[in-house]
Every structure is written in C-alpha cells, then in structure tokens.
Amino acid sequence: MAVGHFLQVGCNLKDHLKVDIIMTDIKPYHDWIILDDIRQPDLKIYKDAGLIYSIRPPEELHPYLEKISKKTGADLIIKPLSTDSIQTGGKMDLVNYKKAVFYKKSFK
C-alpha cells in the first residue's frame, strides 16, 4: 500500500511472513509496485486485502487510507511521522511496539 520510499519493508514482510504483499504508489519506481492513486483507488487491487498499511503518509492521505480499509474490511495501520497526528474520521488505537509507534483500526 502506498509504498513511497519504503519498498524494503514490503519485501521483508513478504519474505518473512510468506504472504502476498501488493505495493501501490501514485509514482511507481519498480516493477513490483502497482500504479494507483488512493484518492481515486481501483478497489479491485485491494479486494481481498486483510491489512492496509502505510508508513509516514502525508496527513491529507489518512482519510483515503481509512476509506479503502473500510470499503474492503481490511485492518488499517498507519505509521506517521513523529510530528504528525492522525487525520482519520474515526478513532484509531495507538500501539507501542518496542521502539515503533503506530496506529491501528479494525473494520472486521
């Protein structure tokens, strides 16, 4: 999801968890990344997703991530910049895991 400059995170998840990872971005720079704009998403890409995640997305994209997650029924994880707040319509749970801080919401 909206891989941006974090291609290696998706690759590591795919290798270690042995799951399908679909990476998207509005400006794909690698063959593994699918062109998609989350502001006007192709919902077929996210049809069977169990998790939508994004690392350090701009705050103005948070509502679009939430909308895709809600439409697909996938859980949502947003790892914001340390100076950003979460800009979704609904409440998200703050999760502290070791040194990582992220927000999670379940739509199931």
Image (cartoon, rainbow, N blue to C red):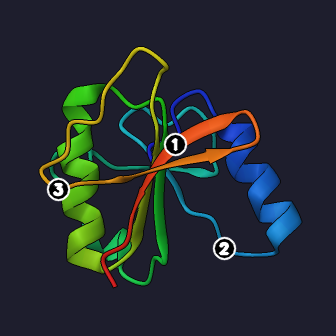
**Which residue has dot 2 on it?**
20
**Residue 54 relative to residue 46: left or right:** right
Q: Camera-side residue: 47 or 102?
A: 102
State which quadrant residue 18 falls in. bottom right
**Which residue has dot 1 on it?**
102
Earlier along the polypeptide chain: callout 1 or callout 2?
2
Query: Which residue lies at the image location 36% right of the left edge and 80% below the top edge?
Result: 47
Q: SS at mark 2? A: loop
Q: SS at mark 3? A: loop
Can you tell which of label 1 and label 2 is closer to the viewer? Answer: 1
Q: Indicate whether 35 appears above or below 87.
A: below
Q: Residue 71: x percent and y percent?
A: 20, 74
Earlier along the polypeptide chain: callout 2 or callout 3?
2
**Which residue has dot 3 on it?**
90
Q: Camera-side residue: 97 or 108?
A: 97
Identify residue type, mark 1.
Phe
**Residue 97 relative to residue 66: left or right:** right
- The residue carrying pointer 1 sits among few (fewer than 14), some (14 to 19) or many (20 or more) residues within 10 Å by Cα, namely many
Earlier along the polypeptide chain: callout 1 or callout 3?
3
